[in-house]
Image: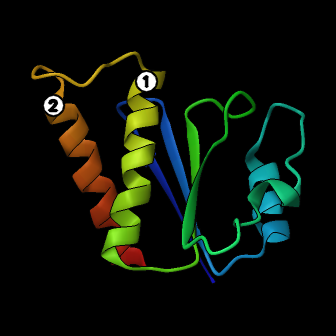
Amino acid sequence: MKYKRIVLKDRPFTLHVFHGYRPTEIALKLNAVNKSGRKFKASEFKLHRHSEAETHYLAPDMPSHYAIILAKVDIETIAHEVFHVVMEHHRYIGVTLDVSSEESFAYLFGYLIKEIHESF
């Protein structure tokens, strides 16, 4: 079992990455940091059949928090899930993908892949 929390200081962003955790354990860990009062249920974090990974946007209970659940750890799976996180985060902060914002998307994408890949 591995868990990594990635927090960016320069923007509202927290990513929780889980590998080898059961849905009950994921819910417990997220409920420990959730300040909204609503408790996550284990059923919210059960991987769909044949899924290698999933991304969860934890809003509205935890705005700017995201969770990636990995059943398979390889660079392709990590990149796929990180792409979802990067796109959702930029929607959250109101930035659309165009020439002027490309570096922001690319920086976050590369940084998150590196952090996750080195940890898992």
Q: Is residue 20 above or below residue 46?
A: below
Q: Is residue 64 above or below residue 72?
A: above
Question: Horizontally, is 40 left or right of 57 in the view?
Answer: right
In this view, the residue farthest toward the left is 99
Q: Which mark is residue 91?
A: 1
Question: Horizontally, is 87 left or right of 15 in the view?
Answer: left
Q: Amino acid at mark 1?
A: Arg
Residue 82 in percent (x, y) is at 39, 54
Mark 1 surroundings: few (<14), some (14-19) or many (≥20) residues within 10 A: few
Residue 42 in percent (x, y) is at 86, 60
Q: Quadrant of residue 66?
A: top right
* Element assignment for label 2: helix
Give the distance between the C-alpha atoms of the residues marked 1 and 2, in whole angstroms.
Answer: 14 Å
Q: Is residue 14 above or below residue 112?
A: above
* Element assignment for label 1: helix
Point 34% across, 56% down: residue: 112
Point 18% across, 24% down: residue: 101
In this view, the residue farthest toward the top is 94
User: Between residues 46 and 112, which one lies in front from this camera angle?
Assistant: 46
User: Between residues 8 and 112, which one lies in front from this camera angle?
Assistant: 112
Q: Amino acid at mark 2?
A: Glu
Q: Earlier in the sequence, mark 1 or mark 2?
A: 1
User: Between residues 41 and 115, which one lies in front from this camera angle?
Assistant: 41
Q: Which mark is residue 102?
A: 2
Point 70% across, 65% down: residue: 48
Residue 14 in percent (x, y) is at 52, 44
Point 20% across, 44% down: residue: 107
